[in-house]
Image (spheres, helix red, strand yellow):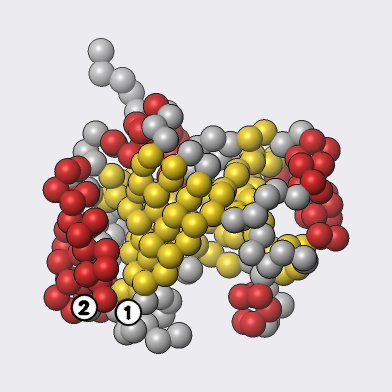
């Protein structure tokens, strides 16, 4: 993949998430297999892989505005993250700067493929990352106005690093219908990225995985049947919110 090329991608879809006890994951996978195929990305890579890693650095305001809006049920909201399909950020895997917007159940997302030299900046500072991209890549201006507005309003800063492993599928009959099963979801609160300070990850949702449906089509009846069969609990929060909740649960309140 050409890392230096600027690419802006746009997605619009519905996303639904469900909490899955780890003990029933094999049975759940067996139940959905008649209706889905392995993700073409994994097939193209070969090597018999069934999943891949993801790592995302999320940015929010000092008072966690994006997180608070989620808890309050604000219909129109957005979040900003840096994402790579690897266990950590490096020049060996593409790095994307993404703005993900939500209106109720509808999702839209824009992403920009960063040059690997973005690693020379302090990734914890979104302002530094955006400034670097504007200097190096003309294509970054497609997102620059929105990002700079968000920076001005919220003074966005890195909050949490989240990583997990994703097992992806596409529908047999509708290739734009996707299901992902994310496991081993763990996070680091305000990571230091110091060579002398190794990152210590903590589980965000112990003993559970997250099943996620992503589609711009209607949800098929077989999926509803599987949700009922396994009595899956609808998860109303994102992995970012899970990571924040996990951290806040360990913070001793000030009396």
For this rendering, which residue is in front, 77 or 62? 77
Instruction: Name the spot of residue 49 as percent of width and height, x first.
Output: 67, 73
Element at label 2? helix
Q: Relative to residue 158, is residue 170 drawn left or right?
A: right
Instruction: Name the spot of residue 250 as percent of width and height, x first.
Output: 40, 30
Is residue 202 visible to us here?
no
Q: What residue is rendered at 40% in x and 53% in y?
A: 100
Circle on res. 153: none
Instruction: Tell me the quarter of the image containing the N terminus.
Output: bottom left
Give whichever of discs 2 and 1 has the lower sequence position. Answer: 1
For this rendering, which residue is in front, 207 or 129? 129
Q: Residues within 10 Å of mark 1 (few under 14, many from 20)?
A: some
Which residue is situated farthest in the top direction here? 255
Instruction: Name the spot of residue 53 as percent of width and height, x first.
Output: 53, 64
- The relative height of residue 100 versus residue 121 in the rendered view (above or below) is above
Element at label 1? loop
Is residue 245 visible to us here?
yes
- The relative height of residue 101 versus residue 44 in the rendered view (above or below) is above
The residue that label 1 is drawn on is 6
The residue that label 2 is drawn on is 138
Q: What residue is rendered at 54% in x and 54% in y?
A: 13
Q: Relative to residue 188, is residue 236 drawn left or right?
A: right
Locate residue 129: give its quadrant. Answer: bottom left
Instruction: Name the spot of residue 68 as percent of width and height, x first.
Output: 34, 31
Q: What residue is rendered at 23% in x and 41% in y?
A: 61
Instruction: Tell me the quarter of the image containing the C terminus.
Output: top left
Q: Residues within 10 Å of mark 2 (few under 14, many from 20)?
A: few
């Amino acid at each position: 993949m050409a890392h230096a090329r600027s690419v802006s991608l746009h997605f619009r879809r519905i996303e639904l998430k469900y909490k899955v006890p780890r003990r029933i994951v094999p049975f759940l996978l067996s139940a959905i297999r008649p209706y889905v195929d392995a993700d073409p990305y994994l097939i193209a890579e070969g090597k018999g892989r069934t999943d891949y890693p993801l790592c995302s650095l999320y940015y929010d305001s000092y008072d966690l505005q994006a997180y608070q809006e989620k808890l309050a049920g604000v219909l129109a909201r957005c979040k900003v993250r840096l994402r790579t399909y690897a266990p950590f950020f490096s020049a060996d895997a593409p790095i994307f700067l993404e703005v993900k917007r939500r209106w109720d159940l509808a999702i839209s997302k824009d992403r920009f493929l960063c040059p690997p030299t973005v690693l020379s900046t302090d990734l914890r500072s979104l302002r530094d990352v955006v400034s670097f991209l504007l200097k190096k890549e003309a294509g970054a201006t497609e997102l620059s106005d929105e990002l700079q507005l968000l920076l001005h309003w919220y003074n966005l800063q890195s909050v949490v690093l989240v990583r997990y492993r994703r097992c992806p599928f596409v529908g047999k009959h509708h290739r734009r219908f996707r299901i992902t099963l994310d496991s081993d979801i763990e996070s680091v609160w305000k990571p230091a990225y110091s060579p002398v300070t190794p990152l210590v990850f903590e589980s965000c949702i112990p003993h559970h995985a997250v099943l996620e449906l992503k589609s711009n089509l209607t949800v098929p009846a077989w999926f509803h049947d599987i949700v009922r069969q396994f009595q899956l609990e609808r998860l109303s929060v994102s992995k970012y919110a899970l990571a924040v909740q996990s951290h806040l649960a360990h913070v001793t309140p000030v009396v």
